Image (tube, rainbow, N blue to C red):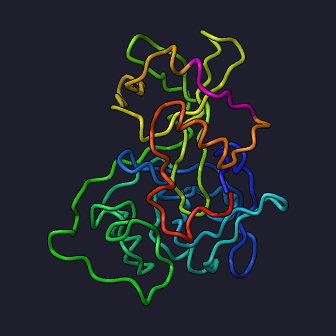
């Protein structure tokens, strides 16, 4: 299911032995644009620390009941490596975190999930990375909250800013940026895939795309009532003359649109 980060904010998080809090925001990496951690608001339970939940422990969101199941116990979460709420996520923390949970480190390999193109939840299928796969890239994590507001720079000028993110809650990939173009075309919002991003200047808070403003202007409009069906996505990719990301998915992936 495709769902916005803002929609997920506030969803209840249910562990194996009770509710632990609500969704606050997400951390994603700026190479594969995949969600690496859900940040939980645990209220008065674990104060003074960021409570991070890896997608390996997350089920798909239940939109009707507005909750996400977490395949961990409260004790596991409480005893996991602690990260102060005012500290960035460091490689040292991530290594400790993944070793604690015994999960594959996503940066050990060139694929979105390290040695695997897609997230494998079956521990029996996990393997040790080869020497040339270990620490093959250095992730830089960004929060959905902080990147909201970044300007979108087309080849011939600015065209709007990032308002939201559309997440695939099966693969936990960021599929689209929701771009608000209100300063140019009042009221219109459009979607841009991270696959079309040329580069990002995090210091300047700008996202560069190799597209003309007029091309973006003529793209299918996105509204909060838009149904993100495969037909809608196909039309969007056809407009930009790009191949859909689903063309490379296994047969059992992405079929629940």
Q: Examine the image and state in which quarter residue 61 appears.
A: bottom right
Work out which quarter of the rendered image holds the C terminus and state it.
bottom right
14 vs 5: above or below:
below
The percent position of residue 164, horizontal first and vertical second, equals: 61, 36
Examine the structure image and report whether residue 147 is included in the region drawn in magenta.
no
The percent position of residue 169, horizontal first and vertical second, equals: 61, 59
66 vs 143: above or below:
below
Q: Residue at x 51, y 78 (%)?
A: 121
Taking 69 as reference, is 143 left or right?
Answer: left
Work out which quarter of the rendered image holds the N terminus and state it.
bottom right
199 vs 35: above or below:
above
Determine the main secondary structure of the stretch shown in magenta: loop
Name the residue at the right extreme.
64
Pick whichever, 95 or 136, lies toward us: 136
The percent position of residue 2, horizontal first and vertical second, equals: 65, 51
Q: Residue at x 69, y 71 (%)?
A: 69
Pick whichever, 85 or 66, lies toward us: 66
Pick whichever, 5 or 25, lies toward us: 5
Q: How many marks?
A: 0
The percent position of residue 58, horizontal first and vertical second, equals: 60, 69
Pick whichever, 32 or 72, lies toward us: 32
Q: Residue at x 49, y 15 (%)?
A: 213
Q: Examine the image and state in which quarter residue 76 appears.
A: bottom right
Q: Examine the image and state in which quarter residue 196 appears.
A: top left
Name the residue at the left extreme.
132
Chain part drawn in magenta: 217-223
Q: Residue at x 68, y 75 (%)?
A: 15
């Amino acid at each position: 299911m495709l769902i916005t980060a803002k929609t997920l904010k506030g969803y209840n998080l249910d562990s194996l032995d009770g509710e632990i809090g609500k969704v606050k925001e997400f951390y994603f990496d700026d190479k594969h644009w995949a969600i690496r951690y859900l940040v939980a608001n645990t209220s008065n339970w674990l104060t003074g620390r960021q409570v991070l939940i890896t997608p390996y422990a997350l089920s798909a969101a239940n939109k009707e009941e507005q909750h996400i199941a977490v395949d961990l116990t409260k004790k596991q979460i409480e005893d996991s490596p602690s990260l102060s709420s005012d500290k960035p996520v460091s490689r040292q923390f991530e290594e400790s975190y993944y070793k604690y949970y015994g999960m594959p480190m996503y940066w050990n390999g060139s694929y979105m999930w390290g040695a695997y193109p897609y997230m494998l939840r079956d521990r029996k299928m996990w393997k040790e990375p080869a020497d040339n796969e270990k620490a093959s890239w250095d992730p830089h994590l960004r929060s959905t909250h902080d990147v909201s507001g970044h300007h979108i720079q087309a080849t011939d000028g600015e065209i709007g800013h990032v308002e939201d993110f559309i997440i695939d809650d099966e693969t936990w990939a960021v599929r689209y940026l929701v771009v608000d173009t209100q300063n140019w075309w009042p009221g219109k919002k459009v979607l841009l895939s991270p696959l079309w991003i040329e580069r990002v200047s995090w210091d300047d808070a700008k996202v560069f795309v190799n597209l003309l403003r007029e091309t973006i202007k003529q793209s299918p409009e996105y509204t909060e009532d838009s149904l993100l069906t495969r037909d809608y996505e196909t039309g969007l990719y056809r407009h930009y003359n790009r191949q859909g990301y689903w063309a490379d998915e296994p047969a059992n992936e992405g079929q629940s649109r």
